[in-house]
Image: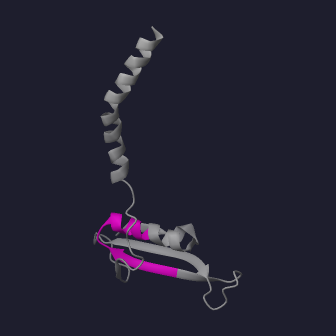
């Protein structure tokens, strides 16, 4: 009896695998693009509201290249305009990977 129950459960698990794979696809599609350059987007002034332009803003810190003994940090700030939210979020992912985050209020992607 135990062997037949085990065989039945094993067979059902093999049949259910394609359905689990399809449920994982939504997470893959929602993932952030990770191949976006830190120089992506265009340099711009603040666009007017209602323009539909995505505004990316990042402020963080990095080691001072002149005094790199580890005790001196330099603030870095970036301000870019994008046409898609996915590209902006990928850009933020790249910057957050490269630099140490600063004020969280100044790290965002907003649609204007």
Q: Tell me the quadrant of the picture where the C terminus can be found.
A: bottom left
Q: Position of residue 28 (x, y in %)?
A: 36, 51
Q: Position of residue 77 (x, y in %)?
A: 51, 80
Q: Quadrant of residue 84?
A: bottom left
Identified at 33% across, 46% down, the residue is: 25
Q: Nearer the viewer, residue 44 or 75?
A: 75
Q: Position of residue 54 (x, y in %)?
A: 34, 70
Identified at 44% across, 13% down, the residue is: 3
Q: Is residue 79 shown in magenta?
A: yes
Name the colouring of the figure. one colour
Identified at 59% across, 79% down, the residue is: 62
Q: Is residue 101 shown in magenta?
A: no
Question: In the rendered view, does 93 fall on the left or right side of 26?
Answer: right
Q: Quadrant of residue 49?
A: bottom left
Q: Quadrant of residue 88?
A: bottom left
Number of numbered tags placed on the structure image: 0
Outermost residue toward the front in this view = 3
Question: In the rendered view, does 104 fall on the left or right side of 6?
Answer: right
Q: Which residues are magenta?
A: 77-92
Outermost residue toward the bottom in this view = 66
Q: Position of residue 74 (x, y in %)?
A: 61, 84
Question: In the rendered view, does 4 fall on the left or right side of 71?
Answer: left
Identified at 67% across, 89% down, the residue is: 67
Q: Nearer the viewer, residue 53 or 100?
A: 100
Q: Tell me the quadrant of the picture where the N terminus can be found.
A: top left
Q: Nearer the viewer, residue 43 or 1?
A: 1
Q: Nearer the viewer, residue 111 or 33?
A: 33
């Amino acid at each position: 009896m135990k062997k037949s129950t085990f065989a039945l459960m094993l067979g059902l698990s093999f049949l259910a695998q394609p359905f689990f794979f399809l449920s994982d696809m939504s997470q893959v599609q929602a993932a952030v693009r990770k191949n976006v350059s830190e120089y992506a987007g265009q340099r711009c002034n603040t666009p007017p509201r209602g323009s539909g332009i995505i505004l990316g803003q990042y402020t963080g810190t990095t080691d001072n290249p002149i005094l790199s003994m580890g005790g001196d940090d330099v603030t870095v700030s970036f301000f870019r305009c994008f046409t898609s939210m996915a590209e902006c979020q990928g850009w933020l992912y790249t910057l957050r990977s490269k630099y140490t985050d600063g004020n969280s209020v100044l790290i965002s992607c907003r649609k204007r």
